[in-house]
Image: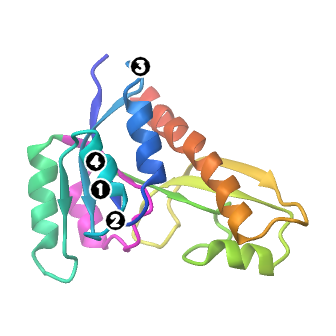
Amino acid sequence: MVKKNACIFISGFGSNLKSLIHKSRDPVFPIKIKLIISNNAKAVGILHAKKNSIPYLIINTKKRTYENLIFKEIKKNKISIICLAGYMKIIPKNFIDKVNKKIINIHPSLLPKFKGLNTFERVLKKSEKKTGCTVHFVNSMLDSGKTIVQKSFYINQNDNLKTLKEKTQKLEHLAYPEAIIKIFRYR
């Protein structure tokens, strides 16, 4: 099996990155992680890149030239898919159009509910019965691309911000690889 080259964008801890690195070692998993990009020099996820000898790039999104730098690296590494994994910057429309690759994201809610930030707080405030995560294609509107995979669980009365986050991350680590397999199954 010829694996597709992937680039993972991160901003923080990197739990989904760690999960995808582990999954990518499976000979039948369809991607190989060739590059990790972070907009945060202090992102803990960079340690996963170092530990697994995966090249990484730290970008300054305040510089106008950062997109050109990313394009150059994507071309150089023959990237077929970009996976946003806790990347806390909105991807500009011109970037989406110019990169002309599949870009996917994971979001900690059952989209279209609770797009954007502070998801767990809003889920609890609205007394939702169920929540989960969504892997979706990225388009020019925030958390609005076509859904690839959703996973859910029922919220119990003892759940709080911490337990919702833990439960959701467990589902994310299942949903993201499943979505990637689904994408490449039909190519």
Please state if 176 lies on the left or on the right of 38 as rendered.
right
In three-dimensional space, the C-alpha distance between marks 1 and 3, rounded to whole angstroms, equals: 25 Å
At 68% from the left edge and 60% from the top edge, which residue is drawn?
Answer: 110
Give residue 43's mark: 2
Q: Quadrant of the N terminus?
A: top left
Circles 1, 2 touching at the beta carbon (< 8 Å) = yes
Q: Give the left or right position of residue 146, taking residue 43 as reference.
A: right
Residue 184 higher or lower than 153, as above or below: above
Residue 19, percent from left and from top: 47, 41
Indicate which disc, 1 or 3, sits on the residue closer to the N terminus.
Answer: 3
x and y, in percent, of residue 91 in the image = 34, 70
* Cα separation between marks 4 and 1: 5 Å
Circle 1: residue type: Ile
How many neighbours does mark 3 have within 10 angstroms: few (below 14), some (14-19), or many (20 or more)? few
Q: Secondary structure at mark 3?
A: loop
Residues packed near mark 4 inside 10 Å, few (<14), some (14 to 19) or many (20 plus): many
Residue type at the position of mark 2: Ala
The magenta region covers: 79-101
Q: Which residue is label 4 attached to?
A: 49
User: Percent x, y for residue 41?
Assistant: 25, 69
Report the disc number at residue 46. 1
Tag 3 and tag 2, C-beta contact below 8 Å = no
Q: Spot the residue most to the right.
A: 157
Q: Which residue is mark 3?
A: 28
The CA distance from mark 3 to mark 2 is 29 Å
Query: Is residue 80 magenta-colored?
Result: yes
